[in-house]
Amino acid sequence: MIFRLATPADAPGLLEIYAPFCRETAVSFETEPPAPEEMERRIAVTTAILPWIVAEDGGVIQGYAYASKHRERAGYRWSVDVSVYLRQGARGIGLGRGLYTALFGVLERLGYQNAVAGVTLPNPASIGLHRAMGFRRVGVYPGIGYKCGSWHDVEWLQRPLGRHEAHPGEPLAIGEILGTPAWNRALAEGQALVRAAGFARGS
């Protein structure tokens, strides 16, 4: 399993994972998956500043995790929203934890202070993953989204990434650490979790 930064060329593989969440579930509130060109645009825009990590095994993307701006106003610039998506057959092997570990390691090295995640309820597996990764519940938006014939609550969770120093430095752009030892260590920490989980299952 190789962790690396996503590129626009990964759009088809990412859509294979993401499209079923759009068409068949309320995990994402998008009702139709984005076109390949739109997915390419999202990857390019995100990775100009923030990490979008893919897990690739034998040339096939098995999952991905990415960060996006939490809000546009300047005072929020140390906070990001995060998401992780896994291929159907790649769940239950520690891949979600591994991808999040790599993502958070990169975000910490970039100088971000908070990670925020929204989870459509009910979704015990996702809530369990986020709690295991150090998130705490900060609130619920009741009946905030309508999809699949029902109104859905969204639980919001938050995880600290930094120390909330009195005078934080400006967050770095991803290009400032890409390919450096700090970048490589962050990805290696996530990959190690997946390997350890695989060995624990006898694979």
Image: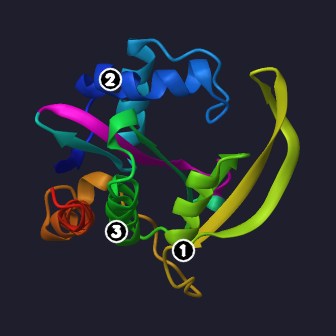
Residue type for callout 1:
Gly
Circle 2 sits in a helix, a strand or a loop, which is it? helix
Mark sitting earlier along the chain (3/1): 3
- Classify the position of the C terminus by image quarter: bottom left
Q: Which residue is mark 2?
A: 11
- Whether label 3 touches label 1, CB < 8 Å: no
Magenta highlight range: 59-75
Q: Position of residue 40 (x, y in %)?
A: 36, 22
> As drawn, is 132 to the left or to the right of 86?
right
- Whether label 2 touches label 3, CB < 8 Å: no
Image point (25%, 60%), residue name: 194
Q: Which residue is mark 1?
A: 134
Q: CA distance from mark 1 to mark 2?
A: 30 Å
40 or 24, which is in the foreground? 24
Is 63 colored magenta in this rendering? yes
Circle 1 sits in a helix, a strand or a loop, which is it? loop
